[in-house]
Amino acid sequence: MAIDTDIPAGLTRRAEGFIRAHGYWTGRYDVEQYRVGWMGHGVPAAQVDRVAAFEAAWGGLALPPSPHYDGGPRTLSGDLPEGPDPDWHFGAGTQRTALPYAFMIGPNGEFGLHAGKWVPLHASVEGWVEALALANHARRWARATTKLRGAAVDELELDGFEAVPEVAGLANT
């Protein structure tokens, strides 16, 4: 069970409540044990620092499955930085199922997918967590939901609707 000190600052009350009610911490690992080895393979110290900061904030957090992307990562955890192709990325956590892509953290902290090409989904990990919390809230409280596909999506009138700024969606707003 998460306690308040485990929850990274800057999240909405909805996301904090979502983590408290549905998340749990499996344990963080010490990135420093890999620093020398990673740097020996050409990973810059600044990239190791990014993984260490991610792990300190999010490492070991397990959340319920996302309604998209085969559920998202099972547990958030930083991994060996990859780059520069042209920018450095690192793994954000293990997949729930076998997938042709990996969940990664981009060069500017974006949360996204990588499968030979980088596709940022949210401007930050916080955005991903906020999106999970919002989807969970909608599933619990909506009286009805309707899935649209194909041309019906293009015909949907969204004038007057506002994006949810906390979600910081980049690819699927």
Image (spheres, rainbow, N blue to C red):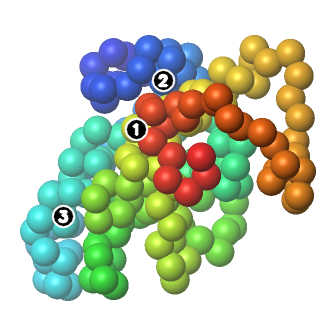
Q: Which residue is mark 1?
A: 126
User: Residue sitting at 88 percent across and 59 percent down?
Assistant: 150
Q: In terms of sequence position, does the residue under pointer 3 or pointer 2 come before the other?
A: 2
Total marks placed: 3
Label 1, residues with CA under 10 Å away: few <14, some 14-19, many ≥20: many
Q: Is residue 86 above or below residue 71?
A: below
**C-alpha distance separating marks 3 and 2:** 27 Å
Q: In terms of sequence position, does the residue under pointer 1 or pointer 2 come before the other?
A: 2
Label 3, residues with CA under 10 Å away: few <14, some 14-19, many ≥20: many
Counting from the top left corner in percent of width and height, residue 4 is at 33, 15
| Image position of 152 (left or right of 25) | right
Q: Secondary structure at mark 1?
A: helix
Counting from the top left corner in percent of width and height, residue 17 is at 50, 15
Counting from the top left corner in percent of width and height, residue 33 is at 18, 61
User: Residue sitting at 59 percent across and 71 percent down?
Assistant: 101
* Label number found at residue 48: 3
Question: Disc 1 marks which amino acid?
Answer: Glu
| Image position of 49 (left or right of 158) | left
Q: Nearer the viewer, mark 3 or mark 2?
A: 2
Residue 46 image-quadrant placement? bottom left
Residue 125 in sight in this render: yes
- Disc 1 and disc 2 in contact, CB within 8 angstroms: yes
Q: Which residue is mark 2?
A: 15
**C-alpha distance separating marks 3 and 1:** 20 Å
Question: Disc 3 marks which amino acid?
Answer: Val
Question: Disc 2 marks which amino acid?
Answer: Ala
